[in-house]
């Protein structure tokens, strides 16, 4: 049984002003699996994630060549609605960024953008999203309190719930645990493993070990190029490229 | 004569501390003097009766109302334009020729003397637009005067709003308009409010611009087309013509109290804004 | 449909933003329209350098006022700038948090006091003091300079303080590591580094001083002759307008607008200079 790839990236080149940040990047990402894209600082992992939901459009002087197909359709086609795309491909950032409003309003922000207005139509979605992010039990009694009062780990799970409320198909996470303690990190990694049953997950981990813990597949990026990719076990135990093994073993970083 | 570095340090430190002391002393000298002489004048009659006998007796209620109305007109007009301009500069443009011209205009406007605003208000609102000496003319003139301040403080407030909030809103599928109104504005509103409040303070204190545009009438204004005399104007006329020193002190004291309250409110907003973690 | 909404809101915002530009243009246009004819009639040089201002007899020379403005402002700068710079250094370097939370609001309050109150206070305290201790009528350039110096303190202090605070911390740390005293650090490292901001602050302070009207009217004495000493009364460009606008008409009124033009030009030049100095950073 051949699984249809959720995302297919073909010959992606990304330029930011005169600098080339991503080179000749081609990759197929299967659905309902966790892919970790890792590499040393400035390899282009963050930029790469941002091309997948076209957040790169916001950067002045950004230019790209190549194709990114989501379920077979190029996301850079002119007739694609960018706002629709971003609801299908959600993103969690490296620093927890609750909006300055209540927990409820944070989760409801996305659906409200899409036109949902009444509190009744929003309440169920909010609860569902919070349950999926493993945050419901901790906040169910204080949905109307400011989200900024939550702890760092809770805020990040709030951000995940916020994305889930839009019922996306793909979830992007850019170093989501870099600002968190190990306990919160473990909780989030647990959630991800459960979420992959319903979503395709792409994570840029903040260290290689996290990739080893959560990912089904990994892709190693160095200075904008894809060096090596494949199932996690295979790449970590038997890397084909010397640079991959050097980075994984910590010879450089 | 070579002074040792330690002596230089001591002299410098003394002078520097002295300068701060000087500032405080001067402030107290001015405020305490006015308050001591003026607060006894402020009575219920002072606040509710209109001036009689050219201001020698009675109260200053018509001035208070006039000041409020002129300030209200100014703020109601200047705020949308100022905040809108600030949003345009931060959200819709990259730094380029247009933004530079707009910003240069705003900066230049902020340096223009208030008497020149008065001249402009006189020739444009009073004469050309035939609004006459009125609260409307005065308010419009003051609106033009506080516009640059509101643009500047609003722009700062909007820029301080974390870029992350914008990114988050876009990443959840928001359009630019939605991001501005639902994510950026609510976070920046406090900083914007501070600018507006400071603008209010400027309107209340202003004399040169209103004296040429709002008229000088002592009776209670009937509408925004009526002329009026703001408190600062009234104080000036009372003091300079020597009409009534007591009433002058009273007016000045009331002015200072109002301005003090405005400043305190603005500071409270700023502190709560900072405490929220911006 | 959503795309159209985006474009519409963008256009609306652009139109609003052009308001600042159009207001500036309006002001310039109207003041110029009203004032240029009289300058043309009298002659530019006769207007700007003419020594006699006697509207009743058709004499419209504003040089005494220009002289008055310049001297009063210079005096204010000489008196005010050192105090302001010292105070900004105090806030940036010396003040413990408790004190800066007192001094900073005090400065804000100083900035908020109406200019008429300053003038009144000056009339009651500064003018008699000068008259009793230094001679002359008391209503003098010196009085004006003193009051203006106090009034421009907040402007200069706030901008200069920000410039000092925004210097990278390693400037200071490097100097201390080399064994410099605090004052030596301030004098030879921090002040020069913050120079452009401080200069901009001073220029803006001077701009404020030149533009001030009400306070100056009350303490300057308003004599239309060129003062011989700082104890003499004088008149500035601003007070000229402020005093006579109430009853001027015809050519006289136009001449006051022309005075406004001169003021506008001076202030725009100062402003452009300040902006240039800050950009060069």
Image (tube, coloured by chain):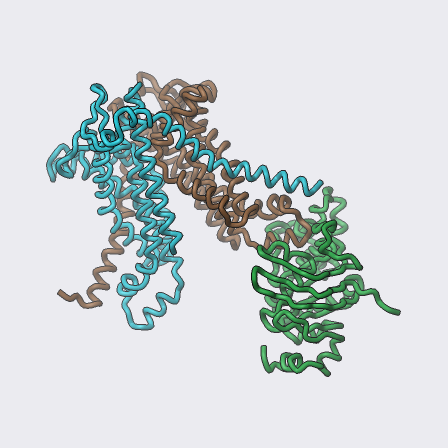
Chain colours: A green, B brown, C cyan
Closest to the observer, C179 or A28: A28
Q: Is residue B56 visible?
A: no
Report whether residue C196 is seen: yes
- Tell me where residue A97 appears, x and y as whole percent: 61, 57
B52 displayed left or right of C226? right
Farthest residue toward the top? B53
Check the picture and name the quadrant holding the N terminus of chain B: bottom left
- Which quadrant of the structure image shows residue A181? bottom right
- Residue B175 to residue A189: above or below: above
C38, A135: nearer the viewer: C38
Toward the right, the furthest residue is A1
Residue at (69% x, 51% y) in the render = B173
At x 76%, y 64%, the residue is A8
Eyeballing the image, is B24 above or below C210? below
Q: Is residue A30 above or below residue C228?
A: below
Residue under the point 12% across and 34% down: C136
Residue A101 placement (x, y as % from top left) = 61, 49
The quadrant holding residue C181 is: bottom left
């Amino acid at each position: 049984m051949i699984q249809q790839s959720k995302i297919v990236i073909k010959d992606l080149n990304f330029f930011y002003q005169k600098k080339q940040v991503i080179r000749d990047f081609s990759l197929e990402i299967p659905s309902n699996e966790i892919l970790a894209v890792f590499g040393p600082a400035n390899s282009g992992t963050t930029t790469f994630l941002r091309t997948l939901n076209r957040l790169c459009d916001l950067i002045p002087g950004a230019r790209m060549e190549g194709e990114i197909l989501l379920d077979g359709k190029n996301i850079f086609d002119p007739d694609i609605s960018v706002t629709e795309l971003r609801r299908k491909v959600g993103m969690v950032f490296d620093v927890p960024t609750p909006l300055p409003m209540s927990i409820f309003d944070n989760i409801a922000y996305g659906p409200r953008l899409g036109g949902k207005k009444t509190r009744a139509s929003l309440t169920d979605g909010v609860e569902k999203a919070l349950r999926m992010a493993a945050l419901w039990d901790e906040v169910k009694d204080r949905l109307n309190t400011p989200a900024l009062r939550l702890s760092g780990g809770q805020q990040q799970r709030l951000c995940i719930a916020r994305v889930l409320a839009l019922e996306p198909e793909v979830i992007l996470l850019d170093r989501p645990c870099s600002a968190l303690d190990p306990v919160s990190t473990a909780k989030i990694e647990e959630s991800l493993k459960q979420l992959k049953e319903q979503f395709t997950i792409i994570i840029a981990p903040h260290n290689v070990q996290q990739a080893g813990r959560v990912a089904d597949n990994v892709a190693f990026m160095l200075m904008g190029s894809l060096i090596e990719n494949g199932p996690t076990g295979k790449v970590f135990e038997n890397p084909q490229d010397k640079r991959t093994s050097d980075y994984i073993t910590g010879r450089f970083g | 004569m070579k002074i040792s570095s330690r002596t230089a340090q001591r002299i410098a430190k003394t002078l520097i501390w002295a300068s701060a002391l000087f500032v405080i002393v001067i402030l107290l000298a001015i405020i305490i003097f006015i308050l001591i002489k003026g607060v006894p004048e402020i009575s219920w009659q002072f606040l509710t009766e209109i001036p009689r006998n050219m201001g020698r007796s009675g109260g200053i209620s018509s001035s208070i109302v006039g000041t409020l109305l002129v300030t209200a007109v100014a703020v109601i007009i200047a705020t949308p334009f100022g905040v809108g301009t600030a949003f345009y500069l931060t959200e819709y443009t990259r730094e380029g020729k247009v933004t530079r011209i707009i910003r240069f205009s705003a900066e230049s406007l902020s340096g223009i003397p208030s008497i020149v605003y008065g001249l402009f208000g006189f020739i444009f609102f009073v004469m050309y637009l035939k609004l006459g000496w009125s609260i409307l003319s005065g308010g419009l003139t003051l609106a033009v005067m506080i516009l640059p301040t509101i643009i500047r403080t609003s722009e700062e407030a909007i820029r301080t709003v974390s870029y992350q909030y914008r990114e988050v809103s876009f990443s959840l599928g928001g359009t630019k308009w939605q991001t501005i109104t639902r994510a950026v504005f609510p976070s920046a509103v406090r900083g914007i409010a501070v600018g507006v409040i400071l603008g209010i303070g400027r309107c209340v204190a202003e004399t040169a611009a209103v004296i040429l545009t709002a008229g000088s009438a002592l009776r209670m204004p009937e509408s925004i087309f009526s002329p009026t005399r703001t408190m600062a104007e009234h104080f000036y006329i009372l003091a300079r013509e020597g009409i009534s020193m007591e009433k002058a002190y009273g007016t000045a004291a009331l002015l200072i109290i109002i301005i003090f309250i405005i400043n305190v409110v603005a500071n409270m907003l700023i502190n709560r804004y900072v405490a929220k973690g911006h | 449909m959503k795309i159209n909404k985006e474009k519409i809101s963008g256009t609306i915002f652009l139109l609003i933003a052009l308001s600042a530009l159009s207001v500036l243009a309006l002001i310039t246009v109207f003041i110029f329209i009203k004032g240029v004819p009289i300058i043309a009639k009298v002659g530019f040089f006769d207007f700007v350098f003419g020594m006699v201002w006697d509207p009743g007899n058709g004499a419209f020379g504003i040089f005494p006022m220009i002289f008055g403005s310049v001297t009063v402002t210079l005096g204010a700068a000489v008196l005010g700038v050192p105090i302001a710079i010292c105070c900004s250094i105090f806030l940036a370097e010396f003040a413990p948090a408790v004190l800066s939370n007192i001094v900073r609001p005090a400065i804000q309050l100083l900035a908020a006091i109406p200019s008429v109150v300053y003038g009144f206070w000056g009339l009651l305290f500064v003018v008699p003091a000068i008259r009793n201790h230094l001679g002359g009528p008391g209503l003098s350039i010196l009085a004006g300079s003193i009051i203006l110096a106090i009034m421009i303190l907040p402007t200069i202090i706030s901008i200069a303080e920000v410039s000092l605070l925004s210097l990278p911390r390693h400037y200071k740390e490097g100097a201390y590591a080399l064994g410099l005293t605090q004052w030596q650090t301030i004098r030879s490292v921090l002040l020069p580094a913050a120079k452009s901001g401080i200069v901009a602050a001073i220029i803006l302070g001077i701009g404020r001083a030149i533009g001030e009207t009400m306070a100056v009217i009350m303490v300057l004495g308003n004599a239309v002759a060129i003062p011989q000493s700082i104890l003499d009364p004088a008149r500035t460009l601003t007070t000229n307008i402020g005093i006579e606008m109430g009853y001027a008409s015809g050519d006289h009124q136009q001449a006051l607008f022309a005075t406004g033009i001169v003021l506008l030009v001076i202030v725009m030049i100062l402003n452009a200079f300040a902006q240039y100095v800050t950009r060069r950073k």
